[in-house]
Image: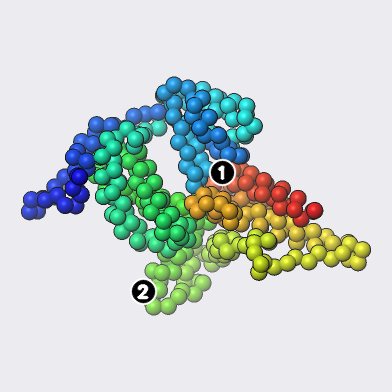
Amino acid sequence: MTPSAADRPADAGTRAPLVFGGIPEAEGFAAVPITARDRVHFRVDRDLPLAEFRADLPDGVTVSHDEGEGLYRVDGPCGQGQVLADWVRAWCAGRGCATVGLRAEAGVRRRAPRDLPPAFLEDLCRHYHPVSLKRLQRNSSTLRMHVPDPDDLHQQVAEWILKAVGQYDETKGVPFGAFLATQLSKWVHDLGRSAHGRTAADTENRQQKAIAAFQAEHQRRPTERELAAYLGQSVETLRRNAQTVATLSGLRNLQSLDGGPDAAEVLVPDSTEAPDQIMDEAEQTLLSHALTAACAPDPTAARGQRAAQPNVLGWATWYLTTWGGQTKTQVSADLGTSVRNMNVHADRVERALKDRLTELSE
């Protein structure tokens, strides 16, 4: 059995190189260098028959699937990105699947972790798993919010280590441990960005850090004016951003209308007894509830999947374009995200909203 990297002796004042599976860490990565590939990213509107898809892929082309994000990545030779994109679109259409957000990216530098020696990869993951968990202790509040189950957290960390192995470029001169630590900080923050939209997550993060720093310095919470000054913002901007954070916090705690025995019952006046105005208000209330429920976390979704998180960006897109009178281009500029990203989240809302309105009309 290969001894743990931590058990290897080091000369006084000198750190011995890490050895995994009998291979020094640097040599293991150098033996399987990163190569450039063209990549096609896409999602689908229903489950993709992955085994059949893999079997039909052209020679030299591979596919990976991120279940948490519902994202598929098809990798092929350089110069074939657009050809692969057209092939993926046609293959999915032939099986009744619509692609969402399909795009080709040229020259993506990645390595396949499975190409590394198995003993090397296993020992490396065994070493960096507890190291990563310790590094992530400073992000415990964010992790508890998005990955509350300890078993799921261990699985998520293992996936992040493999992701870092695939992206690590040993020619840059940065140790893998340092690269992994940097990526872990980024990926934890991306959990919030993925679930709630980039602007909302970043705004909440800045406000929480500013409040914590002010409390540490003054031993009390800041006033609205003090917090605005601390953030270098006007009070009006702070109030607007605070509303974004409040919406985000509220949506995190959403429950479906039929989410359980304690769920509130929505009473609709009988049309023969209620004036048209009351019925209009009732319809607006039902529509509002339907939109909110369509953006709430899906209780049947597995932890870590996108559907298990509230769809804040989808809610904002629908609300601002339907009732706010804004175009998607305007909303995109205000929220600091792309129209393509908004469409991905809005499409999820549309599918759930159709089901919700069908239920309410029966």
User: Where is the N terminus found, in terms of image quarters?
Assistant: top left
Q: Nearer the viewer, residue 204 or 80?
A: 80
Q: Is residue 135 above or below residue 217?
A: above
- Judged by depth in the image, the label closer to the viewer, 1 or 2, is 1
Q: Position of residue 102 (x, y in %)?
A: 55, 34
Callout 1: SS: helix
Q: Position of residue 294 (x, y in %)?
A: 65, 53
Mark 1 and mark 2 lie on one chain; the one further toward the N terminus is 2
Amino acid marked by disc 1: Asn
The residue wearing badge 1 is 341
Q: Is residue 40 visible?
A: no
Residue 336 placement, left or right of 23: right
Q: Position of residue 183 (x, y in %)?
A: 36, 48
Q: Residue furthest toward the right?
A: 272
Residue at the (61%, 39%) spot, across then down? 45
CA neighbours of label 2 inside 10 A, class few (<14), some (14 to 19), many (20+) = few
CA neighbours of label 1 inside 10 A, class few (<14), some (14 to 19), many (20+) = some
> How far, Cα to Cα, is label 1 from label 2?
39 Å
The part of the image, by quadrant, that contains residue 91 is: top right
Q: Nearer the viewer, residue 119 or 266?
A: 119
Q: Position of residue 217 (x, y in %)?
A: 36, 74
The residue wearing badge 2 is 217
Q: Is residue 299 visible?
A: yes
Callout 2: SS: helix
Q: Is residue 331 above or below residue 40?
A: below
Residue 104 placement, left or right of 107: right
The part of the image, by quadrant, that contains residue 62 is: top left
Q: Nearer the viewer, residue 156 or 346?
A: 156
